[in-house]
Amino acid sequence: MQIPLPGFSHPPLPDNFSDSFQVDGVSYHYSVKYDREISRFSTEVSEAGEFIFIAHSSLSADEIHRIVTRDGKKLFRIPAIKPDQNTATDCKNLRIGDEEVPYRIKINPRAKGMTLKINHVLQITVIVPPGYSHSDLSSFLESSKTWIAEKIGRTDLINRNADSNDSITVEGRTILYNIRRSDRAKRIVLKILADASVEVVAPPNTNSNLIHKFVTEKADWILKKITDNSRPRPPIRDYTDGDLLPLLGKEVHLSVLTGGDSSDAWFIDGKIIVKIPDGLTPVSARELVKRGYKKILTQTLEKISQEMVIRWSSRLSIQQPRIKYGEQKTHWGLCTPRGITLNIRLAMAPPDLIEYVVVHELCHILHPNHSARYWKLVEEMLPAYKDSRSRLKRDGNLFML
């Protein structure tokens, strides 16, 4: 370490800066950091793959640029790229289900294999090493479709649970059903989903003929359930400007604003306002608006449910439990030794239905079952609970995202 003489101080270091250079037609960025204790210069590559040029204060920016332009490939150990390799950053589309989902290809000389990144505005980037194989890229993307669909919030584009499908004919009507084999399944279970589709869950090694026999025996029951008009069908939400979205049992207007490079959501003057960046694909725009709506649902449910939990915990003479908020597909609420979890979709429902679910879960703290004693306690707290329970079962399909 150099120690200045008394009365002498070093001149300030030049400002750090960034620059770029090209190798085989590919542009690379690097950062310059000055350090007076280094003899001339050194280079390093960060864990994130960033090129860093550490220079003595005597080196000018022009000198550094000439050094890196001439020797950058060697200094940063950039591997050679095949002459026929497409080195530009390409924009392409990946077909998932019925939609074309855009993605970018970015070559990283430090990459050892292929990786996927999805940023905060749902733009998809595939990072590949120089000299990558197009067939390997196709295989990589094909195997990643489910992950991509989940990350961009479009699991509707791909049926990730269905191992196979079959059909039955009832009263001249063909009914399709999906078969999902699960390690957790102990027996064959038949489900009618919210969109009236039919799913069969079976243990892994269950014979397909046995499954078909089981479904055929339930044919009349299936037909009755999927043609039942007493339960409304789940609405199809576009999440576009001017839509009406449910909040605490009322329809409120959605206002979508565009601009900037970030997204956010607010509930102001009886409106749900969601801001998203400009220039998004329809898929990304829809998902970001949907995420904004989820934020409003969570905030609304937190505000209304916390007061309910405090009040009803006192009525039940129990310690106030910890409250968590989730997005379960088949439960409005859950009670565990660690506390209760409420489904954010409850914020779409009228407050009295939210209150029923809160009381339902709090009563489980005293009776962790659905015994007669449990239901007697629920009735003591909410004498009209059966009506709330019936309405939630009947109208639950309306509270879908």
Image: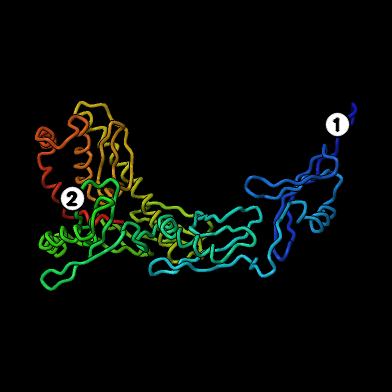
Query: Is residue 229 visible in the rendered structure shown here?
Result: no
- Callout 2, which amino acid? Leu
| On screen, residue 65 above or below 38 | below
Amino acid identity at mark 1: Gln
**Residue lying at 26% horizontally and 40% vertically, measured from the top left:** 334
For the residues labelled 1 and 2, say whether their Cβ atoms are less than 8 Å apart: no
**From the viewer's perspective, is 62 left or right of 243?**
right
Determine the secondary structure under disc 1: loop
Q: Position of residue 392 (x, y in %)?
A: 18, 50
**Residue that appears at 72% across and 45% down:** 44
Q: Which residue is mark 2?
A: 392
Residue at horizontal 74 percent and vertical 55 percent from the top: 19
Q: CA distance from mark 1 to mark 2?
A: 76 Å
Foreground disc of the pair 1, 2: 1
Label 2 neighbour load within 10 Å: few <14, some 14-19, many 20+ = many
Q: Is residue 35 in sight in this rendering?
A: yes
Label 1 crowd bin: few (<14), some (14–19), many (20+), radius 10 Å: few
Is residue 318 shown left or right of residue 279? left
Disc 2 is placed on an element classified as helix
116 horizontally vs 349: left or right: right
Q: Position of residue 238 (x, y in %)?
A: 35, 64
Task: Give the percent coordinates (x, y) of residue 367.
Answer: 17, 31
On-image quarter of the C terminus: bottom left
Q: Which residue is mark 1?
A: 2
Label total for image = 2
Q: Nearer the viewer, residue 85 or 103?
A: 85
**x 58%, y 64%: residue:** 133
Residue 79, compared with residue 355, is above or below; it is below
